[in-house]
Structures are given as structure tokens and as C-alpha cells.
Amino acid sequence: MLNRKDLEQISQRGITEEQVNHQLEEIKTGFPYLKLAAAASVGNGILRPEAEACDRYRKAWAAYQDAGHKVVKFVPASGAASRMFKNLFAFLNADYDEPQTDFEKTFFDHIKQFSFREALCDKCKENEGKSIMQLLGMYQYKSVVANLLEPKGLDYGNLPKGLLLFHSYPDGPRTPMEEHLVEAALYAACQGEAHVHFTVSHDHLVLFKQKVAEVKGKYEKLFGVKYDITFSEQKPSTDTIAANPDNTPFRNDDGSLLFRPGGHGALIENLNEIDGDVIFIKNIDNVVPDRLKTDTVTWKQILAGILVTLQQKAFGYLRVLDSGTYNHEKLEEIIRFVQRDLCCRKPDIKELEDADLVIYLREKLNRPMRVCGVVKNVGEPGGGPFLVYNADGTVSLQILESSQIDQSNAAYMDMFKNGTHFNPVDLVCATKDYEGHPFDLRKYVDKTTGFISHKSKNGRDLKALELPGLWNGAMSDWNTVFVEVPLSTFNPVKTVNDLLREQHQ
């Protein structure tokens, strides 16, 4: 099936022949569905801390920052903005010249409210000799859209989402990347230093670096911090082979194998190389203007405070277990912590002898930890918090996507449809053990939680293999805690018209 040229191509990507054959087998056989115990809810896997507890957690986080730890803000930012403009691309290619759909009408009716309006107007004047409003007055709607999306204009159809102008301010508009720098200064800085890491596509790396060089000094002066801003790209070795519908390798027109990015789960490799005591993770497009940042900052502090409080307890128990100086009463205390605070339950735990119990408890305590904000379900597409059975028989908290659930199981689908909460990708992570050594995060991935998606290239159907998602299967074997956060902290931008929402104005 694989020839000599194939093997050379595979080797150049840092992938082995065995990996490719294994991927083809996974595409052929698919992945097993997960066994669900319940959808997580407040009181059953989701915390809803009272005001007094929130104050305590914020103080715990402030004390942690003052102690000189290294905190990193990790932002997946490789996504292109093309999907944001899907409707406008359709308008450009339509056989009509004036807005017809509700989406098109909304865009043009409110075009003055976008923060990119001045930059777009400048491009229209440069290329067409007329302003936006003059072009619209002449019914040249497509000229305006072309100047927004195409290389001759702002090129927004090809830029990364992180470099688009999202929000307006008196001193000029800001990109999402800049909003993340502001956030880092407000809740992730330690002793005057803020570490921010963006994962970007190779094609956009230079643009990101140029923008950082342009704005870094401005925000350092504004917030009195020094930024350490780093970048990484998704590794070619995490790409996965594509297959034809009959499960044979998909080949390009020149006969070479087609490899595709393995989804955001590939970023576990990038996260694994981050040196930080605490790492915040949030998507590039989930940002708000300064006037609405108070809730975001407050709840990031609360999540981080919960994380370091739980971590301190776990570290204390690990020291006790490693010292050998404990009694059965102490073991009962540790069991309660693992089951109640970390929400990891073993149905037959009472059957374990003390020696086996210590091994079990140490294994569950000594692993990466994450605290995840979850919001009330408002019908957004995406994953949710669940209690799931693991391979070792334990039940723990996971974030699941619909593709991981057996659609033919009515009880499971009922859980998914009626789940009370949604995952907005709002994580705070601890990735070092109690002696300060980094965990190898690749060891905590559930490799059976990938999924197969159906795509096409040049009009030909193909099967694509998605790796276990970064906050799904890639963190499957972490200690996980869910905390309800307000909807005001979740403001993603999926289409350009989302920027017209009050939260982005």
C-alpha cells in the first residue's frame, strides 16, 4: 500500500510507517464511544461557589502570584478567519448584486459599527476612489466586500482571526491578540511579568510577530508590566493521513500522500513544552472590550484560586503517602478528597487493601490538574461536562463532544441534549508535580477518543482523522474540576456579525 516515495514523505514529517498504518486502521475501524454515567450538573460534578468562597479563592490566587510563581497564558490562535466570512463569500459569488439574506442586510445596515470600518474605508478609497458609503450609495456592495476579504484590500478572508480588528477604543481599534495581552496583565502577571504564548499557523507567524512588535510597548506602559510573548506552530508530526472512502490512502494529483492537521488535540505537544507553574487556556476569539472585562478577570482569579488551593491539598497528601507515615484514618481523609473535591470515584474502593489503596490514591493525586469554567447551556454548538467511566473502572469528569457519544443510545442522547452546562474553553491548568517536575502530558491522553470526519479536496471525498481534542481526550486522564461561571465570560465570535452584539461594541 505504501511505496518508497511514501516512506520518504512520511519520514520527512517526523512520522513513522507504523504510525501511518495505525492511523489508517483507526480510520477503517473508527473509535469506541464513551460510557457515560451522567451529565454533570451543579451538585453533581459542577461547583457553584458562594460569594465568601469566591473572595477566599481570589485571595489565594493573589498570594500565589505574590509568591513568584511562573504563570503562562496559552492561546490557541492558529484558526483562519475565513469561516467568519462564509456568508460574505457566498454573497460575493451570488448571482445577485444587492443584499438579499437577513445576514447580508444586517452586515450592510450596521457597517459603521464595525471597528474595522475606518481601515476598510481607507482601502475602498485607495482601490475604488470612493468611500464605503459612496460605494453603497452606488449599489456597489460587492466592491465593499471585496475590499474587506480579498488581498487587494484588508485580506480578512485569509488572515488569522487573532489579527482582525474586533473592538473600538478612543486610541484606536484592538485585535483579539491585543485583548489577550490586556487580560494577561490583569490576572496572569506575577511580579510585573506577564508570559503569553500563542499557537499560530506557519503562514501567519510573521504577521503575529509584526503586530506584537508594534503594540507590545504600548500595553507594557499602560499596565506597568513586562511581556514575555512566545509563539509555536502545530508540529508536522501531529498531522494525520487522509483516506479515501474505501479506507485506502488518499493521494494528491501528483501521487503524494495527503496529510491534514490533526485538530486542536495536536496542541497537547505545544502545551507539553510550556514551562509554567499555572497555565491559563482560552480561545483567541473569546474576548470582550475593557468595559466588560471585570467579570472575566474576577472569574479567572476564582478559577485559579480553586486550582492552587486543590493543588496545595493534593501535594500535601502526596507528601504524606510518600513519607509512609499515615494511618487508615488518614487514608480515609485522602479518599474523601479524591472523591468529593476531585470528583474521581472508584465503585469498589472499599475492597482494596491499604497497600493497594495507597498505590491507587497516589496514582490519582499525582497527575496534571485543571479547573474548567462551564456556563449554562444556551444552545451553542460544542462539548459539555459529563461524568464518564474510565478504562480502569473509575468515574471522573470529562468534557465531551457529540461525536464521542453513541447516537443510537437514547439515554446518552437524552443526557447530551438536556445537559445543563456547556464548555466555553476556559481552563486553568497545573502541569507540574509536587517536586516541581513537569508531567509528560502526552502520557495522559486517551488515544481512543479521536474521531473520523468527512471532508473533501478538489471535489473528491475523503476521511480525516481528528486527534483527541485538547480539552477532550487529550486531557482525559487529568484531575478535572468544573466550576459554573457567568455567561458574561463567554463571548465567542463565530461570524462577522457577532461583532455587532452589544458585548463587542
Image (cartoon, rainbow, N blue to C red):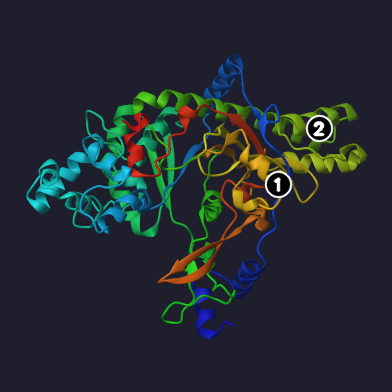
Q: Quadrant of the N terminus?
A: bottom right
Q: Quadrant of the C terminus?
A: top left
Query: Which element type, helix, strand or loop, lies under badge 2?
Result: helix
Amino acid type of disc 2? Ile
Q: Nearer the viewer, mark 2 or mark 1?
A: 1
Residue 20, placed above or below residue 408: below
Query: Is residue 317 rendered to the left or right of residue 8?
Result: right
Q: Would residue 478 be seen by someone viewing this image from the given angle?
A: no
* Circle 1 crowding by C-alpha within 10 Å: few under 14, some 14–19, many from 20: few
The number of numbered badges drawn on the structure is 2
Residue 147, placed above or below residue 480: below
Query: Is residue 239 rendered to the left or right of residue 35?
Result: left
Query: Which element type, helix, strand or loop, lies under badge 1?
Result: helix
**What residue sits 53% from the left and 85% below the top?**
4
Seen from this angle, which residue lies furthest bottom? 4
Of residue 57 and residue 313, the one placed in the foreground of this image is 57
Of residue 427 and residue 421, the one placed in the foreground of this image is 421
**What residue sits 28% from the left and 53% below the top?**
91
* Circle 2 crowding by C-alpha within 10 Å: few under 14, some 14–19, many from 20: many
The residue wearing badge 1 is: 410
Query: Is residue 487 rendered to the left or right of residue 335?
Result: left
Specify the label residue 335 is tagged with: 2
Q: Would residue 202 be seen by someone viewing this image from the given angle?
A: yes
Of residue 365 and residue 53, the one placed in the foreground of this image is 53
**What residue sits 57% from the left and 19% below the top?**
54
**What residue sits 36% from the left and 38% below the top?**
498
Of residue 70 and residue 431, the one placed in the foreground of this image is 431
Q: CA distance from mark 2 to mark 1?
A: 34 Å
User: Percent from the top left, x then y, of residue 202?
Assistant: 38, 59
Amino acid type of disc 1? Ala
User: Percent from the top left, x then y, of residue 478?
Assistant: 66, 43
